[in-house]
Amino acid sequence: MKNIWIICQKELRSYFVSPIGYAVIALFAIIFGLGFYVVAHDFVQYMFRAQMTGGGATLNVNEQIIRPILGFAGTVSLFLIPMITMRLFAEEKRNGTIELLLTSPVEDIGIVLGKWFGALVLYVCALGTSLLGMALLFAWGKPDWKPVVVAYLGLILQGACLLALGTFVSLLTSNQIVAGGITFFGSLMLYMLSWFTNFDDSRFSKVLNYLSIITHMENFSKGIVDLKDVVFYLSFIFLALFLILRQMESLRWRS
């Protein structure tokens, strides 16, 4: 556990020594802030029109602001996660330090978990900038806090899955641009699988729909913690980390 934390700290320092860490947090904050402004502005305008026309429409902050904007946050993360993971192992291979890492007294699982946790902490920090918008909603409105907590849990689990995928891709190449591009493509495919199967009830389509990460985010966005969704995310993470360990062993034998 100590080695994992040491490597995690090293990765976090490397993120903030370079512009990557600041860029990821700033980009997420700016894009989320713009999305939050648009959704909140539309909600306020709709509320004013309903009052002026005497409409009796029910306005729900959770359903009309929080749920769509946190769904938007999950979409934004597709673009930022490749920036976080592309350098994890690719930079080590490009600089020729991967051999030193593999021959160090730290076990492979400690190296993998340390790097993955470092990436996850940066992702959570970027996601944390969205809490300012949530704080404004709670200050001026009366949303239910439980669905918000569950939605954030879903975003963290979804991000952890894609970070594990990106870490695996980064280990396969020494080119950071290639690693980032493949991670983005893979993440986008996992995101869009549910789109391709919306109007198909075949067994194969149901399997593809189950493999889509967005399918399992739907319940979290509604404030529902379903065991099958948690199991899917944890199984995805375990499989990706397992493949990384096997690839690490292969590199160790070849080096």
Image: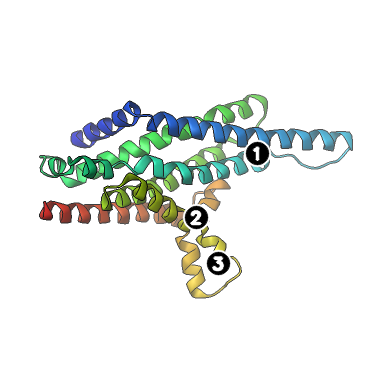
For label 3, the residue is 197
- The answer to whether 228 appears left or right of 42 in the picture is left
Name the residue at 51% across, 70% down.
205
- The answer to whether 135 appears left or right of 191 in the picture is right
The amino acid beneath tag 3 is Thr
For label 1, the residue is 65
Dot 2 lies on which element?
helix
- Rounded to the nearest angstrom, the CA distance separating label 3 from label 1 is 27 Å
* Viewer-nearest residue: 125 or 252: 252
The amino acid beneath tag 2 is Tyr
For label 2, the residue is 191
Dot 3 lies on which element?
loop
The amino acid beneath tag 1 is Ile
Q: Does label 3 or label 2 sit earlier along the sequence?
A: 2
Q: Is residue 134 above or below residue 112?
A: above
Q: Nearer the viewer, mark 1 or mark 2?
A: 2
